[in-house]
Image (cartoon, helix red, strand yellow):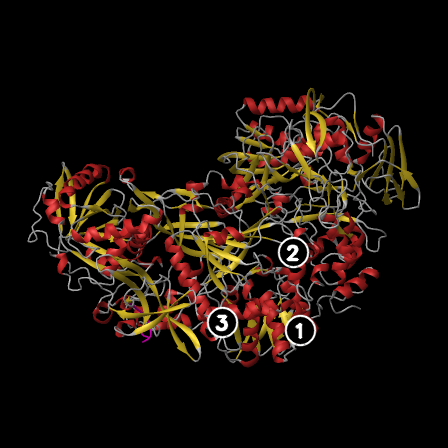
Amino acid sequence: MTRRYSALSLFKEGLAGQTGWKQAWRSPEPKPTYDAIIIGGGGHGLATAYYLAKNHGITRVAVLEKGWIGGGNTGRNTTVVRSNYYYPESVELYGLAHRLYEGLSKDLNYNVMLSQRGMVNLCHSTAEMEIGARTVNAMQLNGIDAELFSSEDVRRVAPIYNFSPDARFPVFGGIWQGRAGTARHDAVAWGYARAASRLGVDIIQNCEITDFIVEGGRCRGVQTTRGAIRAERIGMAVAGHSSVLATKAGFRLPINSYALQACVSEPVKPILDTVVLSPGCGVYVSQSDKGEIVIGGGLDRVPSYAQRGNLPKLETVIAGLLEMFPIFGQLKLMRQWAGIVDVVPDSSPIIGPSPLPNLFLNCGWGTGGFKAIPSGGTLLANLLATGKHNDISRPFDLDRFASGRLIDEAAGSGIAH
Amino acid sequence: MSAARLATGGSAIDRSRPIRFSFDGASVDGFAGDTIASALLANDIAVVGRSFKYHRPRGIWGAGVEEPNALVDIGGPQASPNTRATTEPARDGLVAKSVNAMPNALSDRNAFLDRFARFIPAAFYYKTFMWPDWHMFEPRIRAMAGLGKVDTDWTSPGTADQVNHHCDVLVVGAGPAGLATARMAAGAGLSVTLVDDQREPGGSLGHRAGEIDGKPVAMWIEETVAVLTAGGHLILPSTTAFGIYDHDLVGLNQRHFDGRRDTLWRVRPRHIVLATGAIERPLPFANNDLPGVLSADAALAYLRRHAVLVGRRVVVATNNDSAYEVAAALAEAGADVTLVDIRRDGIPETPAKVRLVKGRALAAAMGRLRVEGVTLDDGTRLDADCVLVSGGWTPTIHLFGQAKGKLAWSGARAAFLPGDPVDGISVAGAAAGSVSLSEVFADARTAVAPLGPTTAALPRSTGPEATGGIVAAWPVPGSKGRIWIDYQNDVTVKDVELAARENFVSVEHLKRYTTLGMATDQGKTSNLPGLALMAGITGRTVPEVGTTTYRPPFTPVPLASFAGARVGELMAPVRRLPLESVHRESGAIFQEYGGWLRPAHYGGRGADTDRAIQDEALRARRSVALFDGSTLGKIEVIGPKAAAFVDFLYYNTMSTLKPGRCRYGFMLSENGVVFDDGVLVRLDEHRFVVSCSSSHVAAVHARLEEWRQDRFGRDAVYIHNATSDMATLTVSGPNARKLLETIDLGRSLDDADLPHMAIGHGSYGGDAVRIARVSFTGDRSYEISIPADRAEPLWAHLRQAGQAFDAVVIGLEALMILRAEKGFIVIGKDTDGTTLPHDLGSEGPRTKRQTEYVGRRSLFTEEASRGDRLQLVGLTVPSGEAPLPTGAHGIKRESGRLHSQGFVTSSYRSPTLGRPIALALIERGAARHGETIEVQHLGKVRTATIAAPCAFDPAGDRLHA
Amino acid sequence: MQLFPCPFCGPRDETEFHYGGDAGNARPDGAEVPIESWTNYLYLRSNPKGTAREIWVHMSCGEFFVMERDTVTHKVLSSTALGGEHAA
């Protein structure tokens, strides 16, 4: 059986009809007890399992997924990876993720196709350029590779943009991060799953949590559609459904669930090399390695758990896209979908202990969880292994809502969290 | 294959109107009524494109929306990459190019990739390209991406129309089921809208045999259409229902073919009937992707609609009854037909002139660029120039699935059918699994029954009836050769086996891992065979494997349809001043500020801009300035509890304000953050005017309404947004009063009668005006509010009277300098989403107020009480230096690293002071006046000294001068 | 596009409405309110999957009202004018 992925193994398997590959991950029956349980088989949950095994040597770990792994927001997002954040706390968090992403393919032995073709957040007025300067300066102080772009710089990286003088949102410049880009979203989930499985983690699909087992005021396990499973450390990373599980566990979170829509055009030959975000047009867009134009916008207006696309937001997002790139008026929409995201008042995640002892949270990523998968996993793994915060996760504790020390990036970073 | 146009026949084409278009540079002849595909077939052009991954030659497969292969780029003003040749009308002069082929479909230079296929199976890219680094490989792989090309020289031929439409019954599909349903619903007195994606109604009746009510089907169609049209019902041909959205909103895309963009319809029906037909499936055999392998039903459509005989030596391969009519028709038309049926028993009568091979399946098709023959599973070889296949029918239940309808597996039909009914949606005809016209019409009756009694008679099928006999023929694991499942994305049986081997057994994993069903056809022909194969590999049933989620759109929809008229300014309209044209005549340069288009300055463009602004600011201080402040929010709060209401809404106590007086204050959000600032005017005991920032009017208004309705009660106060009722013209400067005294404003302007922070009522030209002595410049100022449509004469009068005082009209940029000289803030510029009132030096209410107000508790959190908060300060720079860049950060060095300690929020050169001024939010800034700090901008470090925010006239003498 | 029933105007497109939070989220007054109560009021949400009772405002007419709806199926169950303080 071929275990390791490489050009050579692919070649050898080619000669043998590709029949020697092992399962990417095992699908064992759940055991009655584990050292740690992770609820949610998305990117964050799988990464948590991987880092628990790799960083902390804890391998008696189960990842419980109610459907199929990577089927939530990991498989529904627009795949942007970046760390151009304003506050030092955010930079630590997303910067860690960004660095881990840069080594992830080799670390996991799975090509997640991190494509660092840069991202520009456009500024459409003098006032936005001033905010842009404030943001870039903060990022540079925090060690992020941000640059303040002039309109000419923008033209260089996105020549097909609408530079017409009567454009509704003229380009004054933008915030550039060269290391930003995209990654292949499914591959991130599968790569973590494969690597975690090889380290001994049990990945249990089609296993929905029906209740928490609480004894002596502490969480001791979960009831699932596949029976009771017990552990002394339980982490949850169930973006979009965090409040549902919190309710089962007996507490509330500062979260509303909203649908975030995305869509892709039919695939066309390469025409857009970078990720472009226009706050004025309310759109961020990139072109995938398959050639599809990948389009994202803001949240729907109505709190929802329905993972379905809707017309009103789609219409405004596409109008914005065509204002940015009028020549995309030739293209056709191929597929439209929605993910359910946790929206938190300060648009920053919640990482830390929950009000129910033994249960730890990784939630509240809003629209930006994908880019943070490696750090979300690292930090939740650390919490599960040690029971304690480290310096990176501490500011993101749930207690910040009582202390008032919110980390509100919303003003600085536009729509694309 | 040697396809050709027959000398006669073809119900869709008009031989009197020949047309000519180009494909891959070659001239192609056809007739009006041809599609690009039918014309290409008539000209025996077999290879029309290349597949996505292996660049395999691709020919036309189908005759409709299911087409996975025949995509072309259409050029010109109607440019449209990846257009389906099977549904695109051929038009004179049209330029079409094959996709994913260089230089053309027939000789594609990337065709060599197919020879390496064994090394690049499904998802191979996840397993390699990691060393040394993906970035080394990506550019070349990326260059291979995509199918069609975007024309970078294209300009939009206009915007798409969008139509909102209501009806009682929306019938999707104008085949026999849809036509019958529409007619019966119309007979029930309901308004009916009937849509179909083909240019003519009829659906399968256009090429399948039948007789209805004793008449030829064509006559029945014509009659039905005539009845509907006469009844005022709407029939939309060339229109695709692409999505069912929330609350049964149906999205339609209508094509026009006359130069207009497509039209988007948002239809809100009371009831939906899905009569969307069914799509024929391929059969699995090696090289089943060769050009010349077509859907049997498509071949019949080309024959009967376009008089195109797709081959001379034809093998028809089937597992079901529907192909028998095809075999018969082609034989009748002169082809040499061999019918290969996998079944031995229970099969229809062998058609005349057709050779039948029972109990056999195709093992492989042979040929390089097109079919040259086939091998049967017993090894028999047959010459053939065309292979027609029918693997059964997949009901088109996409819209039902989008509406969250559950599917039910039918073994008898070898297909998923609509399961439990969904409220408000009926499914009829082939989409519901019906085959014969009698069954179809029975469905129509069932669909219409809940809508009430109908006067229309149920149509009767009086001709031959189709039968639905089928034995499933799914791809099976371990098959020999390369058997395609997804033609466009090159997914083969081996790829599905590989996915299963690697544990990608969930149908959604299968889709994502192999890209099965993710091409532009979204798997209309491939999804079911793919998941049936997965079922076979994993020992599950097809329903156990399940389907992927049905997502809109059913077929690709032009982006322009969604955008509609939201182009340019209509995408996000700006708000405009009543006096905009007057300002333009005065040479104003406009810019957008917070959604308003406002004069930035008057005169001075490009390099002269700064000088113009400086000049305006300087002259404003010297004598008098005129400014159009009409964007200022003016929201009236009226009622018995108005005073208590404004007290609660403001951080500052407002109820102590005397009638006729004004007070500056903050509004906070419940999290304590300063949301808006402005002057509150008390007109009388129970009437206030809330002034708010131009860009915050709607939000402040909503906030007032919320507290009114949620806390105070509807009868306690009334709220009226008067912002656009009134224009506000500001006269500011040492000579402001002198200027105004030359104009009859119907009242005394004496300071005793109208002191600073007072309001007076007057009149101008018979109109009531309100004069407020509030100042955003630090100079004596009068804000005169006058009904918006009466502002122009007053503005002209002010300008004319101002000549004697060397008055200057100033734009917003000069005003920004004047207010910054005074240390007056602009919310959102000099504050951010964390700024609390005490950060701005307003500590009093927080420490002293005893009554409740919005945001109060949040001012006493741990964070709000920190000592190192960012506080508003001024900054000065060493003599002779340029202004600080706005957005520069104050820095501090701690443990060998640089940290931000705040940032510059506003920065200008003050012409009056003759030096740069700046406002900033700096850590503990209020207590650090006089301290020099380092300031960094884009890597460069300068120094600045912390000062009080107010740099000009700190005592405020000029307010009274 | 969902249709929401404004109690004053009748059914209107969702784009005319603005979400206003949980119904019955009573505001605790006072500078000395325990921070837990204030945080509950200000930030914590029940965010139910299924039936939800919410405050909405119809921006076209400016009226706030309580709407019960299903957050999964998007079925609207009821809509009533805001009854008074906090619309419990």
Q: Mark 2 against mark 3, which lies toward the viewer?
A: 2
Which residue matches tag 1?
A: A201
Label 1 lies in what chain? A
| Percent x, y of residue C85 | 30, 58
Q: Residue at x 10, y 40 (%)?
A: B744
Q: What's drawn in magenta, residue-wise?
A: B865-872
Label 2 belongs to which residue? B139
Graded by Cα atoms within 10 Å as few (under 14), some (14 to 19) or many (20 or more), the crowding at tag 3 reads many
- Which label sits in the foreground, 1 or 3? 3
Quarter occupied by residue B36: top right
Disc 3 residue type (three-letter)? Glu
- Give whichever of discs 1 and 3 has the lower sequence position: 3
Q: Position of residue B129 (x, y in %)?
A: 70, 62
Residue at 67% x, 45% y is B147
Q: Which residue, given by chain and number where applicable, does mark 3 sit on?
A: A92
Q: Position of residue A98 (x, y in %)?
A: 55, 67
Query: Quick check: can you spot residue B72?
Result: yes
Q: Mark 3: which secondary structure?
A: helix
Residue A146 in magenta stretch: no
The stretch drawn in magenta includes residue B870: yes
The numbered mark 2 sits on a residue in which chain? B
Q: CA distance from mark 2 to mark 3?
A: 30 Å
User: Vertically, is B412 above or below B216?
Assistant: below
